[in-house]
Image (spheres, coloured by chain):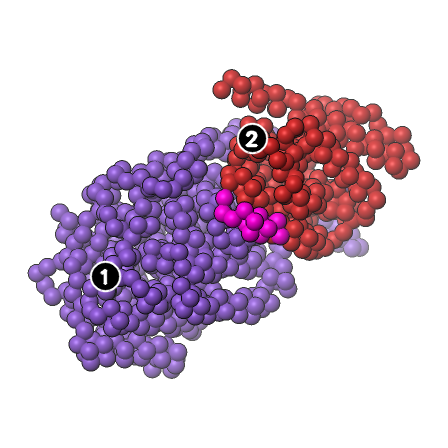
């Protein structure tokens, strides 16, 4: 049973990917993808039911296979570097390839560990996020890519290739969150980097290729740190046992030496989670078709980064490194929220918001109290749902107006009311009560008092967050006086994922109490104690020595009354308060209207009929990338240097 | 449970009465300061009922959906205060109310409302951090965000949180939309924005806005009263003092630009907040 579950989680996406690559018919492809999605989702729920276990695959030399594929991937990077004449890609491919080869062949390192995979509560939460939300995005991609290719008028469809990388991404992520052997973890890490590169480059425009190359070298830099951490652990701790994630986090390896590899691994996590100063690769990734962004931002790729940092939390608990990680994350949260205000492209606002929220999650890991870790896990779940939904909305909007610019979305409510409604809920769910993201932020703020500097960043960033979301929403809602909305029809491949995610926001949001008590607490317990005891089932352990069960959100009251208030505040007026045509009036224009109700023309200078236009504010001089980036990047680099220097040397 | 229900009902009825009276008082004082006689003190209520009786007119349906949200969340925030619940969540709910207000203005194609909405966002940018710092300060002092916990303490918050108290006084002007910070909308007519955020509301909908303003005023003064809860009448006196201070400032100050407002609040308000939190952290340690 367990071996089947593992095989489905990791290998089924690979098989499905190969199938959709070979079979080039739209309907058959769709069938395969939908079927895979359903199986993966059901499988992840089985994991939930099964609870934690450990597993080592047998019957085949998987270790050898991983090694061979490692080199295949790295040699491919080398080829990319040379063929694109991109020296950074080339250099960081070599910095991984040479040490790895020296270590594995020169030193004859042989790492075989049992168990190879450890399934615990945190990885189950992760696999649920990956398998359910990731699958929904794959379903969405079917129709989206069809429309996309129709619009770009491609001669030969590249959709099979696209779906191939999209689907195996899920398998790699599942492998990544289960892997206990660090060498295997590194392999899955590289596969996600590879998938990410291929998907960003998909459209093959110059911009796409350049941005894909940037994503590749930045993640390869992270990969390099990973390789050095591997070798360092192996050499200083004398053997393969040191390369077990369980051994690292459960305190079996002690001493001052452990902190350097841990810091390196956190650095790797930072690159993948696009923390400042590495944010540019994720922003560049916006050129990719929207399902890619949705996948990268919600359930895969960047979540691998925060997963690694969170996973290692007990290994750096109580050190200066931990505090510095908290400050680094909090700074990213703050700076990215500020930069988001100046963005004129919807997808870039979403990207900055992702970077900001990942910063928040990493800061929580750095604060490293049970409350903070619980907040981090809640944020991972809620961010995945809301951000997945928002990217799918952005894609749907893009395919209706063929633009990504916020200014072009002006008055979308009158053109595409359904999409606007869903987008509005998605946006509100990112930063307002009673939605889950805010609950996470609430816990985080409470926990952040341990690191006051982080708390200050949290406060400022929360405020900036309100501004950029509301500003964008305001552009969508701008409508002329008119009665009645057009009916909007969406293809099933669009609407099913959209509605499911929307329902998810409410169901998970309202059920946060039981979810918190049954799952999040167990997962937090895992993270904090470093899996010293892996309990069977979900209810078995309550954290001892912490007061947060009483002091946390659930001790005070339940969340659902707040949802009731939300319904009274917005849903009831929306449904039941009507407006009669005779009650409508044109807006005030100092009496210079040209007459009709739903016109936006007025008599300008010399009584010339003129359409008036409204625009959003972006404050680019103050908050634009040109102004802020040098400062932000410098500060971020200084923090990183402190993290790898001071944080490592002084424990 | 019954007690709480009674508290809720009393708060729902009494708060707008107090708020309305305070607004009437405001108009009287302002008139006197300007050498006028001024309207009777219950004029706001006359206005309110007159507006309620007017014809329903609107410029879009979206617009007044948000106004109901504004009202509901403002009332809920107030209930959080009187039921002595979590102050951090109170600030977040108040934030939702603010967002509804802005979105209501954005939901029209009106240049003046948009002006106001964009400026109101800057107002949020200016006051929200101070409110969050206040919540954090309460947590630093009491080890809990619960307002009921504040009432259990013998020592008033004012003793340890006085820098934050000054910061809160500062943002009270912004939140009440009084000069020098009546930037997004104003109680006096200003040509360039007409009435800013509320330009497009009229009749009963405008009456709703006034009702929310009354609730909001009571809520804000209530938050100020939290600085001295034992005995509570001292806190209430402090709050009323703060209100009168605002009226004076309103009458002697000219409007500032939005940029100045954000600059001032992010320098003065935030520095005070940060100093306060840092001091508490260093002296008391982790709560």
Q: Would you place residue A563 above or below residue A392 in this image? A: above
> What segment carries the magenta color?
B275-287
Which one is nearer the viewer's eye here, A159 or A297? A297
Within the magenta stretch, is there residue A351? no
Residue at 78% over, 35% down:
B244
Which of the chains bears the disc numbered 2? B
Q: Nearer the viewer, residue B202 or A384?
A: A384
Q: Residue at x 24, y 68 (%)?
A: A237
Q: Position of residue B153 (x, y in %)?
A: 57, 33
Give the numbered dot on residue A514. none
Badge 1 sits on which subunit? A
The tint chain B carries is: red
Crowdedness of circle 2 by 10 Å Cα count: few (<14), some, many (20+)? few
Instruction: Answer with left or right where residue A472 lies relative to residue A436.
Output: right
Look at discs 1 and 2 and give the one toward the viewer.
2
Q: Colour of chain A?
A: purple
Where disc 1 sits, the SS reads loop
């Amino acid at each position: 049973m367990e071996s089947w579950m593992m095989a489905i989680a990791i290998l089924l996406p690979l098989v499905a990917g190969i199938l959709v690559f070979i079979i080039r018919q739209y309907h058959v492809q769709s069938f395969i993808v939908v079927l895979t999605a359903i199986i993966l989702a059901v499988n992840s729920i089985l994991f939930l039911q099964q609870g934690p276990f450990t597993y080592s695959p047998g019957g085949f030399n998987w270790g050898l296979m991983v090694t061979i594929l490692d080199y295949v991937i790295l040699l491919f990077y080398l080829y990319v570097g040379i063929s694109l004449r991109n020296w950074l890609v080339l250099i960081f491919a070599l910095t991984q390839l040479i040490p790895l080869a020296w270590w594995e062949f020169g030193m004859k390192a042989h790492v075989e560990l049992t168990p190879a995979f450890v399934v615990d509560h945190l990885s189950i939460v992760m696999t649920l996020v990956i398998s359910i939300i990731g699958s929904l995005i794959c379903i969405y991609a079917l129709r989206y890519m069809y429309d996309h290719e129709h619009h770009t008028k491609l001669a030969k469809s590249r959709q099979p290739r696209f779906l191939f990388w999209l689907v195996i991404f899920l398998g790699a992520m599942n492998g990544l969150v289960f892997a206990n052997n660090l060498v295997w973890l590194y392999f899955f890490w590289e596969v996600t980097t590879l998938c990410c590169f291929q998907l960003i480059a998909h459209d093959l425009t110059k911009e796409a290729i350049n941005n894909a190359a940037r994503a590749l070298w930045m993640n390869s830099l992270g990969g390099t740190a990973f390789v050095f951490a591997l070798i360092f652990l192996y050499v200083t701790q004398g053997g393969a046992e040191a390369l077990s994630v369980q051994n690292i986090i459960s305190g079996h390896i002690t001493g001052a030496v452990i902190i350097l590899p841990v810091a390196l691994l956190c650095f790797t996590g930072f690159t993948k989670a696009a923390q400042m100063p590495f944010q540019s690769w994720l922003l560049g990734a916006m050129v990719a078709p929207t399902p890619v962004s949705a996948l990268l931002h919600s359930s895969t790729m960047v979540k691998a980064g925060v997963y690694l940092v969170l996973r290692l939390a007990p290994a750096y608990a109580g050190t200066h490194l931990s505090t510095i990680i908290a400050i680094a994350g909090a700074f990213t949260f703050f700076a990215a929220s500020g930069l988001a205000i100046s963005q004129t492209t919807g997808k870039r606002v979403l990207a900055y918001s992702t970077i900001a929220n990942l910063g928040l999650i990493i800061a929580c890991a750095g604060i490293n109290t049970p409350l903070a870790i619980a907040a981090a896990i809640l944020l991972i779940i809620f961010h995945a749902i809301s951000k997945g939904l928002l990217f799918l909305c952005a894609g749907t909007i893009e395919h209706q107006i063929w633009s990504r610019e916020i200014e072009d979305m002006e008055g979308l409510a009158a053109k595409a009311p359904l999409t606007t409604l869903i987008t509005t809920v998605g946006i509100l769910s990112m930063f307002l009560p009673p939605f889950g993201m805010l609950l996470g932020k609430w816990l985080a703020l409470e926990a952040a008092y341990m690191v006051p500097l982080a708390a200050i960043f949290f406060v400022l960033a929360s405020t900036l967050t309100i501004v950029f979301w509301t500003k964008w929403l305001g552009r969508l809602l701008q409508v002329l006086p008119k009665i009645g909305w057009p009916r909007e029809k969406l293809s099933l491949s669009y609407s099913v994922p959209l509605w499911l995610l929307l329902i998810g926001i409410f169901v998970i949001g309202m059920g946060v109490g039981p979810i918190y008590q049954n799952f999040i607490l167990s997962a937090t317990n895992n993270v904090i104690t470093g899996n010293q005891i892996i309990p069977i089932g979900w209810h078995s352990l309550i954290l001892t020595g912490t007061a947060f069960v009483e002091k946390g959100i659930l001790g005070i009251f339940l969340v659902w009354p707040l949802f009731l208030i939300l319904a009274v505040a917005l849903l009831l007026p929306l449904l039941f308060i009507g407006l009669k045509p005779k009650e409508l009036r044109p807006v005030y224009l100092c009496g210079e209207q040209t007459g009709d109700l739903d016109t936006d023309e007025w008599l300008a200078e010399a009584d010339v009929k003129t359409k008036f236009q409204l625009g959003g504010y972006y404050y680019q001089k103050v908050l634009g990338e040109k102004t802020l980036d040098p400062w932000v990047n410098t500060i971020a680099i200084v923090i990183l240097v402190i993290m790898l220097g001071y944080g490592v040397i002084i424990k | 449970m019954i007690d709480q229900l009674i508290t809720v009902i009393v708060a729902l009825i009494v708060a707008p009465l107090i708020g309305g009276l305070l607004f009437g008082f405001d108009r009287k004082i302002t008139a006197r300061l300007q050498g006028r006689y001024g309207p009777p003190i219950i004029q706001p209520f006359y206005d309110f009922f007159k507006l309620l009786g007017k014809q329903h007119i609107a410029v879009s349906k979206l617009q007044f959906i948000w106004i109901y949200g504004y009202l509901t969340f403002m009332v809920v925030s107030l209930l959080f205060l009187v039921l002595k619940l979590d102050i951090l969540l109170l600030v977040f709910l108040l934030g939702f109310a603010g967002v509804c207000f802005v979105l209501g203005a954005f939901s029209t194609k009106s240049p003046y409302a948009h002006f106001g909405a964009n400026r109101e966002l800057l107002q949020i940018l200016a006051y929200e951090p101070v409110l969050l710092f206040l919540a954090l300060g309460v947590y630093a002092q009491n080890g809990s965000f619960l307002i009921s916990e504040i009432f259990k303490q013998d020592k008033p918050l004012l003793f340890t949180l006085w820098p934050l108290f000054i910061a809160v006084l500062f943002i009270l002007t912004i939140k009440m939309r009084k000069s020098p910070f009546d930037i997004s909308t104003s109680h006096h007519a200003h040509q360039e924005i007409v009435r800013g955020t509320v330009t497009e509301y009229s009749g009963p909908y405008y009456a709703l806005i006034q009702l929310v303003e009354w609730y909001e005023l009571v809520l804000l003064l209530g938050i100020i009263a939290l600085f001295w809860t034992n005995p509570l009448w001292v806190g209430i006196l402090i709050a009323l003092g703060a209100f009168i201070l605002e009226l004076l400032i309103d009458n002697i100050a000219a409007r500032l630009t939005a940029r100045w407002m954000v600059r001032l609040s992010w320098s003065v308000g935030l520095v005070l907040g940060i100093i306060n939190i840092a001091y508490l952290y260093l002296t008391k340690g982790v709560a």
